[in-house]
Image (tube, coloured by chain):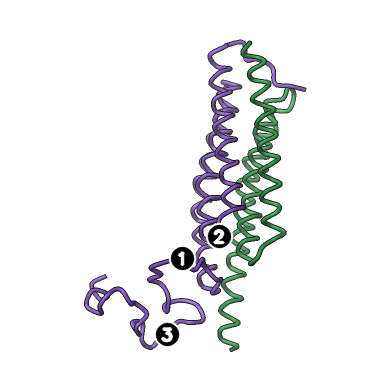
Chain colours: A purple, B green
Amino acid sequence: MTPQSTGNAALDLAVVFFLLAGSFFVFVAALGLLRFSDVLLRMHAATKAGTLGAGLLLVAVALYFFDLAVATRAVAGIFFLLLTAPVAAHLVGRATYWSDTPLDPRTSPDELRGHYGATATTDEPDSGAYSSTSPEEASVL
Amino acid sequence: MSAQLLMAAFYVTVVTLSVSIAMVLWRLFRGPTLPDRVISVDMLGVLAVCFMSIYCLLPGVPVYLDAAVALALIAFLGTVAFARFIEEDARRTKEGS
C-alpha cells in the first residue's frame, strides 16, 4: 500500500517537502537523545526538535487531504503538542535537578547549585556557592 | 512523476522514524538514570504520534489521525506522573537521610 497522488502536482510536492522536513527533525531529535551527554541536554533535543518534527508531519497530513475536518484535527494535534511539550519538559527538568541527577561536568555556571536538592543549604542560600559573582551582585540578581 | 516522489518520501519517512525509534529505545534501555528513561518514553510517545499521522496517508485509514491527537494528550499525562514520582522520591530520600 502506498499513498495515492492528490491529483495536484504542486500539492504533492508540498506534502513531500513537509514529510521530509518533519522526518529530518524527528531524526535529529532522536539522535540528540542518543548522543548528548546528560539529561538536560537530551531533553533539550527531544522536546524542541521532536515537537517541530511532529508538527511538520501533521502539516503534511493536513495538506495531503486538503479537507477542513482533517485540517482541524491536525491543527488540534499541533496545538496539543505545543501545549504539553514545554510543560512536560519543565516538570522533568525540575525533577531531574531536584533529585541530584549528575549533570555533565562541563555544566558551568550552575547558579542553582546549593538551592535545590539534597545539597540545599536552606539556612544560608548564599553560602559561597557562587564563585564568579560577589554577594552584592548575587543580591541584585 | 509527483506520485512516485510522494511514494518515495513516504517510505523515506517510515524508515527514518523506524531508525529514530531504535535510537530512542537504545537510550531507554541504557539509561543511565531514571529521568533519561522518562524522556525516552516521552519521545516514544511523540514518535508514535508521528507514525500514526503518516499512516493516514495510506488509502483507507484516515481515522489514525484521531488516535494520534488523543495519544499526544495521553503521553503527556504519563510524563507528568513520572516527573512527580521522581521529585517526591527525591524529597522523601532527602528527609529520610
Residue at position x 57%, y 28% in the image: A60
Q: Check the picture and name the quadrant holding the C terminus of chain A.
A: bottom left
| Residue holding disc 1 | A106
Image position of B29 with respect to A19: above or below: below
Q: Are marks 3 and 1 in contact (CB under 8 Å)?
A: no
Residue A50 horizontal side relative to residue A110, left or right:
right
Looking at the image, is mark 3 or mark 2 nearer the viewer? Answer: 2
- Circle 3 residue: A121
Q: Which comes sooner in the sequence, label 1 or label 2?
A: 2
Q: Amino acid at mark 1?
A: Arg
Query: Circle 3 — which element?
Result: loop
Residue displayed at 55% across by 60% down? A37
In this rendered view, identify the residue nearer to me: A80 or B50: B50
Q: Looking at numbered disc 2 in the image, what kind of residue is underneath it?
A: Ser
Q: Which residue is mark 2?
A: A37
Q: Relative to the observer, which residue lies in front, A1 or A23?
A: A23
Determine the chain carrying the residue at label 2.
A
The percent coordinates of residue B87 (x first, y second) are: 56, 72
